[in-house]
Image: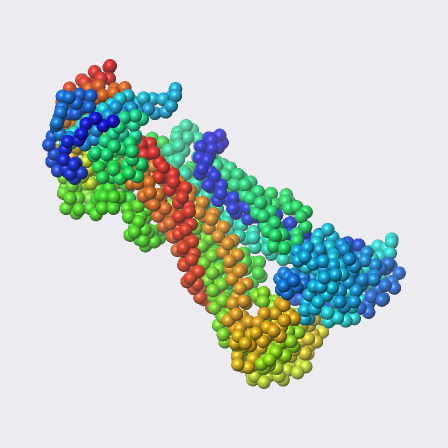
Amino acid sequence: MIGVALKGLLGRKLRATLTAFAIVLGVAMVSGAFVLTDTLGKTFDGIYSDSYKSTDAVISSKLAIKTSDGSTDAPAFSADVLNKVERLPAVRIAQGAIEDESRLVDKNGNAIGKANEGLALGIDPSGDQALNPLKLVEGQWPRGDGQIAIDRSTAEEQHFALGQTVGAFGDGPLTKYRISGVVSFGSEGSIAGSSISVFDLATAQRLFDKQGKFDLIRVGADEGVSDTELIGQIRPLLSETTQVKTAAAQAAADSKETQDGLNVFKYFLLGFGGIALFVGGFVIANTLAITVAQRMRELATLRTLGASRRQVLGSVVLESVTIGILGSIIGLFVGLGIAAGLTTLLRATGIDLPSNGLVFSTRTIVVSIGIGTLIALLASLRPALRATRVEPIAAVREGAVLPPSRFARYTPLASAAVGLIAIALFAYGVFMSGVDLKVRIAILVTGVLLMFVGVAMIASRVVRPLAYVLGAPGARFGGSAGSLARQNAVRNPARTASTAAAVMIGLALIAFVATIGQGYKSSFSSAVDELFLGDYSLSAGTGDGEQLTNKVAQAVAKAPGVEEVSEVRSGKAKVGGKTVLVTGVDQNVAKVIDMTWSTGSASIPGQLGRHGAFVLKRYADDHSLEFGSPLSVKTPTGKTLGLEVIAVVDPPKGGSPFGEISVSTATFDSGFANHGNDLTLVNVRGGPSEKNTAALEKSLAAFPAAKVETREQFKSSRTKDLEQSLQILYALLGLSVIVSLFGVINTLVLSVFERTRELGMLRAIGMTRRQVRRMIRHESVVTALIGATLGIAVGIFLAVLTTAALSKYGVVFAVPYGTLAVFVGVAILAGVLAAILPAKRASRLNILEALQYE
Amino acid sequence: MRTRVIQSDQDEVATNGHPATSGAVQVLDRPQEHEAVAAPVVSAHELTRQFGVDETAVQALRGVSVDVTKGELTAVMGPSGSGKSTLMHILAGLDRPTTGDVWIADTEIGGLNDTQLTKLRREHIGFIFQFFNLLPMLTAEENIVLPLRIAGEKPDADWVEELTAAVGLGDRISHRPSELSGGQQQRVAIARALVSKPTVMFADEPTGNLDSTTSGEILSLLRESVSSYGQTTVMVTHEAQAAAIADRVLFLADGLIVEDIGSSSAHDILKTLEAVTAR
């Protein structure tokens, strides 16, 4: 029986290949995700351990609190500790250094790279460089406040040579430096695409406002001193906000954040691989169901020859598993190729990944092949069980049909039950508060998957009306081919339904994402419209979340016509063990942001003083805060701010720039190390105009990163990131739509095969090849459109539930009609593409052979 | 090469369905005996058809010339492998000869591409198949008008009604094929072949899949269509009973026309067939 199954598979190479493709893409996503993140992880581990190559211990500052997202930078610590450390008997050498961010400017005056892509280091040029992770390639280490050493990659790319001047800016305005040297990091020209600016230690301390401070101290031990001994000697010297770690532990700690990020990225990609595999499972199940029906006589003949039901079951499962293994192996290598392509792409976009090869671990191989095969196995069970119900008598009976499943009569009931359970799970997942995130995700995923299964089960009942409506334009304008296509689409509603259901899954998720995105965008826009009173915003120009140095505020204040400048900065802190966002505002804030006061008035920001705070209404309600309530805020620098609530502000639902607690800029700066601005808003005489824009831009000439934006520009630049994220999600979900296309192709190829004689007749009585192609194409488009319709309906339904749950965060329900129309267009195009091969086969049929076909 | 000039009125050929003058048998290897009689609507000259190449090559036709006369029912008989189906396929524009030429309604098909040939079939040829070949998702009526729909023409309601009455479908007109008996399905197929008023209708073993009573009914219907509509028809059959309704019976053996007789009884046809087979 094994031989029969495998030979049968060989005899149907095209179908086996197409079916295998249903697995290939999903597995490729899985293996690609593993290879890419493993490779990136290894690269970053290498970078971090290289930074402490000859170092034995590292002293760094410690965050006094641990915020939930871990994104807060540690402040610099007092340099005093260096002298004490140097005097320790175990210490051979100890060197303080500054590590911050600074970007270089190219010869046209434009900042190189993106924000966060410029590393600044302050080193002692006269000291021993044994602990310095950077190597001098040529020239000298920078000395004094006019010199800089830059990384080899940037020097090469931007054609900077020793002795030339280059502009650099960190926290302050753009300054020109003379290039004294070119450095490399390990063997690489730069660190993962970041440019490197090296300054003399004192210059760096001044540049980043860290006079008398270090970001870290590298310690080298005397020979024969163990790490434990070294650490043991250093530790008693340290304050509450500094810590010492062995070089390896420090590298691991530095790398942890990156690795955590990579893990999120990995699970994200694996999630999409999982969706593609789920769709692939649908496609395989559907294809097998059709072939079992078509091979009924063959299966029955095997039964008459003595094959048991179990053997029939085994042959179908074996066929599927073979396809699964085949597809998984191909997918594994396609994934490897994708990862290779992506790392090349990253390198091409300037991220200097060390070319130490892709990491292709055993886990990648085992999981990729295992999951692909498992999906194929699971997908084959239902068709295999149905195959066992073929009676031997079907071998001789003309036109025998597969007996209906034993459970067929329960299908409507079962699909309704599945659908209800799915909705209940999903609703529980989105509405229930206080559920652990992982549990919540598991519940949501189960709910969504069940919903797809439920809709797929019920879909055969809606295929007829849907095909009638969706096929109408084709029937109207496509002539007889169009109307025959529409009728063909409903000949076997179950088949069309499950083919369309595969298309539905991808489109449902895409429609869901688009609708949520639209909801977020419109709530954001309306919040900005409501709040934004200022004439201009100054921003880092790279979308959300980038902070801009507060020095731009001082610079812009001097521009002609500027009436008010207001800054908003923020940082995470803890109140009663819970992480809150604290914002620092100045007295002008109410003039640039329209604030609705529940308690207090627009004069409040000017009256905050050392201890005053205003809180968000939601926060006040949740924590029963009112005028006069005390608040104790613990900041990352270890300070505790004793505050008193003097006002309550009620921002619009779409959000506001304010954290739960807002304090004066001075209070904020006393508690937080990070003094960059989230928002810098400006009012000018006469409001926004070309002249005023030019004046502001002129005043900011020394700040290449600062962009002058009007309210509309602010809205679009702040939603640009969201747009980009949406595009990426569409692309990733598009993969599962591609997988489902293989299902459409398969179904059509099998239908063409089944209707061979019919096609011969149509050709004989006068249907041209072009008409045949059109007929197949229309059927394909109708199927794809049924999938799109079901998908968009399911997606919007899920989005309605989700936006209802998120309404307290201001996310409104808004249907992105334009985007959805594009998706429908894409579905039509997809249908046309899927039809190419089957239509070609159908139109090329030899009429005579087709007519004699049984 | 074309050796004779068609002498009939071209309009009459193009708009078939009108009663046409019955003509005598025309076989091209004996043209001198039949000068100036009714025009052939399909004619073939020196057809050969080879399947496969080299050692496995099979000569299905070895030089067949034939004229199908307008308004006649021509039966083609012969033992299995005699080439009768191949001849019909070539005459109907479904297959092309290896050598020789075929004229269907004044057009030589050798120079036509697939689309032109398809359109020629659409306009001039009607088909009746052994296995009916109706589309299962269409009703009887939709199946009948299918050729017109494919050609993008609007069916003439009166004509369709007349036709359905003539083939005896009546109230079964809105049923789907699965709800019809074999005989009824073949009636639908005959109506479908007649609906476009083709220049010539080809029937491939039209009774091959029917019981004898039903066969008789279908044969009467075919005869009727020739007699009352003047529908030129070519029928391939291996049943003498069927061939007995023909105006002319051609016998093929080994890829050649070996006998060409006029209207004959089933008994005579059977005898001729036996003689041909024994050869």
Q: Residue at x 39, y 21 (%)?
A: B54
Name the residue furthest right: A89
Camera-nearest residue between A130 and B48: B48
Colour scheme of the picture: rainbow
Q: Residue at x 67, y 66 (%)?
A: A72
Q: Position of residue A39 (x, y in %)?
A: 64, 49
**Is A733 situated left or right of B275 in this image?**
right
From the viewer's side, name the closer residue of A11 and A388. A11
Name the side, left or right, on which A44 lies relative to A647.
right
In the figure, A239 relative to A2: above or below?
below
Q: Quadrant of residue A225?
A: bottom right
Q: Which residue is painted at 72% across and 65% down in the image?
A: A177
Between residues A495 and A775, which one lies in front from this camera angle? A775
Q: Quadrant of residue A819?
A: bottom left
Determine whether A516 is above or below A772 in the image: below
Residue A162 versus residue A502 in the image, above or below? below
Is residue A760 among the parts visible in the rendering? no
Left or right: residue A764 compared with residue A266: left
Question: Could you tell me residue A25's position as x and y percent?
Answer: 51, 46
Which of the pair B184/B33 is nearer the observer? B33
User: Residue A607: x percent and y percent?
Assistant: 63, 84
With B111 as the anchor, is A624 left or right in this view?
Answer: right
Q: What is the quadrant of the C terminus of chain A in the image?
A: top left
Question: What is the count of numbered marks?
Answer: 0
Q: Residue at x 56, y 79 (%)?
A: A683
Is any part of residue A517 visible from this angle? yes
Percent of width and height locating residue A794:
43, 57
